[in-house]
Amino acid sequence: MFSPWQNIQIPLGQYIVQLVDWLQVHLRVLWDAITVASRWLVATLESGFTFLPPFVVILLLALVAWRVRGVGFGFFTFAAFALVDILGF
């Protein structure tokens, strides 16, 4: 099948590589700030979730789900997180 654009190629890959390289060089401070903030957030959430026993965290999340979405969603949330806990993740 003949296509009039068959031999036309746009070097989009090169443009993207150049853009990423430019962003890495000129916005390094921003990327470093995002990295520090995301690491702090993950560490804070991890310490918050591991502070209490897993069963208490599961109950709290199920209660929040129940209040926000309803009884069925609360039971599903409890069952899903309990299964994850039983499987050892």
Image (tube, helix red, strand yellow):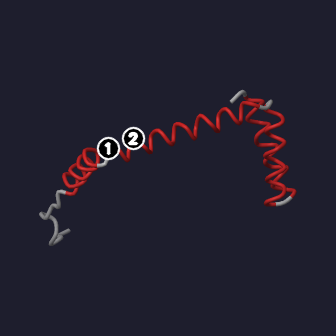
Mark 1 neighbour density, 10 Å: few (under 14) some (14–19) many (20 or more): few
Image location (x, y in percent) of residue 76 = 80, 49
Dots 1 and 2: beta carbons under 8 Å? yes
From the viewer's perspective, is 23 left or right of 83? left
Instruction: For the C terminus, give its image quadrant.
Output: top right
Going 62% across and 37% down the picture, which residue do you hit? Answer: 44
Image location (x, y in percent) of residue 27 = 31, 48
Which residue bears the numbered disc 2? 32
Q: Nearer the viewer, residue 62 or 1?
A: 62
Mark 2 neighbour density, 10 Å: few (under 14) some (14–19) many (20 or more): few
> Which residue sits furthest top?
88
Going 80% across and 30% down the picture, which residue do you hit? Answer: 53
Above or below for 54 versus 75: above
C-alpha span from label 1 to label 2: 6 Å
Q: Quadrant of residue 59?
A: top right
Q: Nearer the viewer, residue 6 or 28?
A: 28
Identity, as a three-letter code, of the amino acid under mark 1: Arg
Image location (x, y in percent) of residue 1 = 20, 68
> Which residue sits furthest right?
71
Q: Nearer the viewer, residue 55 or 78?
A: 55
Which residue bears the numbered disc 1? 28
Identity, as a three-letter code, of the amino acid under mark 2: Asp
Q: Secondary structure at mark 2?
A: helix
